[in-house]
Amino acid sequence: MGQRRLTSALAVASLLLASCAGEGSEEATSPEPVSGAEAGNGSDVGNGSDVGNGSDVENGAEPETDAEPETDAEAETDAVPFAVEEQATYDSPWALEFLPGTSKLAVTLQAGELVLHDLAGADEVSVEGLPEGIVVDGQGGLGDVVAAPDFEESGRIYLSWVTSGEGGTGAVVGHAELVDSGASAELRDLTVIWEQDPRASGSGHFSHRMAFSADGEYLFVTSGDRQLLDPAQDLSSGLGKIMRLTPEGEPAPGNPYADEGGVTAQIWTSGHRNALGIDLDAEGRLWSSEMGPAGGDELNLIEEGQNYGWPEASNGEHYDGQEIPDHTEDDDFTAPLAWWTPAISPGSLMIYQGELFPEWTGDAFLGALSGEALVRVELDGDTAGEDEIWDMGARIRDVAEAPDGSIWLIEDGDGAGLLRLTPAE
Ligand SMILES: [Ca+2]
Ligand SMILES: [Ca+2]
């Protein structure tokens, strides 16, 4: 606790950006990285990706483990523009949420534990009354945690996790009242309000990240493609979509396919692979980060009814080398505003609204898993500009903004550090 870890890091080189539609179709045939990553930029992203080596691709499904990337490039160290202090460590944490009006940071652990970390220094508390039957396997487990817009009055939080049932596994979302007495804490009236539909076999690409709209009226939930690919283009399937729901999990009124009923009525956008990051900017625009296959990780501006292309278009390729046409201007898909090849594996997204790092207000921050980095992308209105990639020397699972404007990261895996970033002296 409080141990100071001097971070050094990579500098980095703006790997690319600017996706530029249109720029790429012929690059699809090239074995070279499609974009960015000039030789010697110090990035160690290697051939990293969110999944394995792709050798077990069968039946159109994709491999699913979070494999360690090759890290054969020499990292050129350089001072990162922030100081890093480790606050605590956890085993396989997944998500961070600062609880409004309190000194508490909620941390989910994939194995099915919710911990309250007190910024004021009181002992940590493990919350009682977590859901039963959480499936902890592969990418599955306890997932995201977000505070309801009226948390300060209601104490309500939303959790996502993976369950199994007829048809296989699938993500669910529930809400509960968090009652925190200081020495102990519990969830009351836990109610499941949404189930990923359909369920599927395997343990990958649940996504199940959540964010509330700026007015607090709607809950966005990312629903991954479960490594089945084609359902992402099928509006009768709930997979490969971003859903817009009421706070009780009903399809939001005014959704683009509201008249269709069923799961289709939940859909806000389609053509997603594994959207593990979602956040709003100060103007209320919704952004999402998405893991591509081999390359083609994306930062997307999420707008009603748009189709983001997967698996018909991607700036990456299939793991077995099979081409996927790159995004172009005239393919009827919405292209990413920033993208990365080779993969960095963005597992989280936070749009910074604080003042502690004034030059970064309004910018997007992505935690990179295989890239073992924190990535900043300059946002200006609805456009994305340059990026910076800072080597953190560990897979980054989530990124969050604290009430004081400091940036907090949580590493991935066992013994993962909870890191507080403040401006360098
Ligand atoms: Ca896309
Ligand atoms: Ca491609």
Image: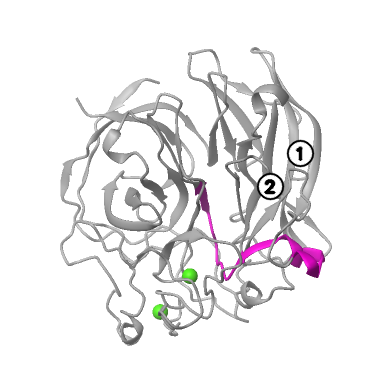
In the displayed structure, does residue 175 sit left or right of residue 6? right
Q: Which label was assigned to residue 108? A: none
Give yes or no for contact between labels 2 and 1 (Cβ–Cβ under 8 Å): yes
Q: Name the quarter showing ligand 2.
A: bottom left
Question: What is the span of residues highlighted in magenta in the rendered image?
Answer: 258-279
Above or below residue 148? Residue 210 is below
Q: Residue at x 45, y 44 (%)?
A: 350
Above or below residue 351? Residue 150 is above
Q: Is mark 1 within 8 Å of ligand 1?
A: no
**Coloring basis for residues:** one colour
Q: Which label was assigned to residue 161? A: 2
Residue 167 showing in the rendered view: no
SS state under label 2: strand
Residue carrying label 1: 131
- Image quadrant of residue 152? top right
Q: Residue at x 72, y 70 (%)?
A: 237
Question: Is residue 270 a member of the stretch shown in magenta?
Answer: yes
Q: How many marks?
A: 2
Of residues 339 and 56, the one drawn nearer to the viewer in this rendering? 339
Of residues 228 and 237, the one drawn nearer to the viewer in this rendering? 237
Image coordinates of residue 287 in percent, x first then y, are 49, 54
Image coordinates of residue 284 in percent, x first then y, are 51, 46
SS state under label 1: loop
